Image (tube, helix red, strand yellow):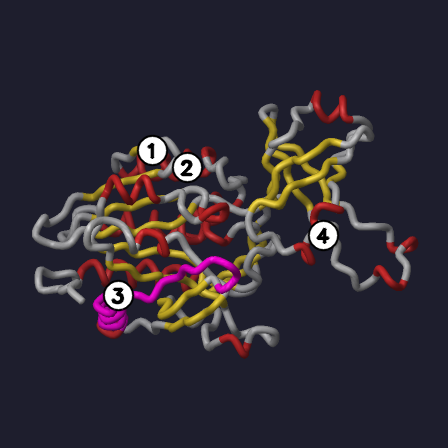
Amino acid sequence: MIRETLTELMLIPGLSGHETRVARAIAGHLDRMGLAHRSDRLGNLSCTIPGDPALPSVMVFTHMDQLGFVVRKVEPNGLIRLERLGGVPERALPAQAVVLCTDKGDLPGIIANKSHHATGPEEKYKVLPYAELYVDAGFASAAEAQAAGVRIGTPVTYLPRVLDLAGARLAGTSVDDRAGCAVLLALAAARIGKPGPTLHLVWSVQEEFNLRGVLPAATALAPDIALQIDLLLACDTPDMTHRGDVALGGGPGISLYSFHGRGTLNGVIPHPALVQLAEDAAAGGGLALQRSAHTGALTDLSYIQFMGPEGVACLDVGFPMRYSHSALEVVDLADLDGLTRLLDLMLDRITPDLSLTR
């Protein structure tokens, strides 16, 4: 199920602030499960599976949006300038295929790369700032681009693609975080009819933009516990071995420490009761559980932990992923299956004696 769902969702462009098509696809899955859902004014999609009111309520969430660009300017000759939205790596942009999501339909284009035969020695190892790059969508004039629906503010993403790699591995345009979206749908299916805590499932918006799009949904649901699903940096390639021990195919994991470290004084030190809950659930279910601690990463859980009069007990759970924020990210489907099972087992282990007191 997860392979098909993930493939479907990765092929839908959904820039931050423009997640409607992704939300519509997810809502269709919930409809087929018979689960009621709602959207708030920002576009967060929420679904509640009622449970035992004596147990702490749990919100499990993940973000629907992806990083990308918006159109900043259309040149008189029809070439298109972009403004970056989210943590787009500039060194990975030239020659990438993109899609311009206009009101008249999706249009393909490419981020231009200067012809090799005209590239001097001093340019060969230079990374161009995104503001100097432009998209060639084939238009010969600004009027032609405008007639096709391209205008300032038009959302642009990497061209959606999915590649089946060896074994159970996939490369895709927005593994971050359509993989989380697929896991959350699988968890919803697993929890129907099961006893346990009241479970709020949220597919959130604008995580790649400002990390705060989920806040209206979290405010409305007021959970006691929040579990956030996102990537864990896989450290099993030569360029990443010094960063940790998380390995693709090694199973789901938890984050023991996150901190942005680039001007944003925020991150998550998880609640110890939830760390223990995850460890006990993994051990009881015979699951490998990987551990991550990183500076440079941040999720929207960072802001939820401070909500309400007592705060919210929080834990980041995730799946290993290679090549974050690139046009093609890589995931192992076995890790996603394991993550779904881990979350299900954690929910089963929430009892009235689970203390969230510090």
Q: Give the Cα distance between marks 4 and 2.
A: 32 Å
Q: Residue tagged by mark 3?
A: 271
* SS at mark 1 in the image: strand
Q: Give the Cα distance between marks 4 and 3.
A: 40 Å
> Does the rendering let one see residue 1?
no
Q: Give the Cα distance between marks 1 and 3.
A: 29 Å
Q: Are marks 2 and 1 in contact (CB under 8 Å)?
A: yes
Q: Give the Cα distance between marks 4 and 1.
A: 37 Å
Query: For the residue marked with disc 1, what is the amino acid?
Result: Ser
Q: Earlier in the sequence, mark 4 or mark 3?
A: 4
Q: Residue tagged by mark 1?
A: 39
The image's mark for residue 23 is 2
Query: For the residue marked with disc 4, what is the amino acid?
Result: Pro
The image's mark for residue 220 is none
Q: Nearer the viewer, residue 264 or 55?
A: 264
Query: For the residue marked with disc 3, what is the amino acid?
Result: His
- Asked whether residue 3 is drawn in magenta, I would say no
Q: Quadrant of the C terminus?
A: bottom left
Q: On the picture, is 314 further left or further right than 325?
A: left
* SS at mark 3 in the image: loop
Q: Is residue 234 above or below residue 36?
A: below
Query: For the residue marked with disc 2, what is the amino acid?
Result: Ala
Q: Are marks 1 and 3 in contact (CB under 8 Å)?
A: no
- Asked whether residue 265 is drawn in magenta, I would say yes
Tell me where residue 184 appears, x and y as whole percent.
34, 50
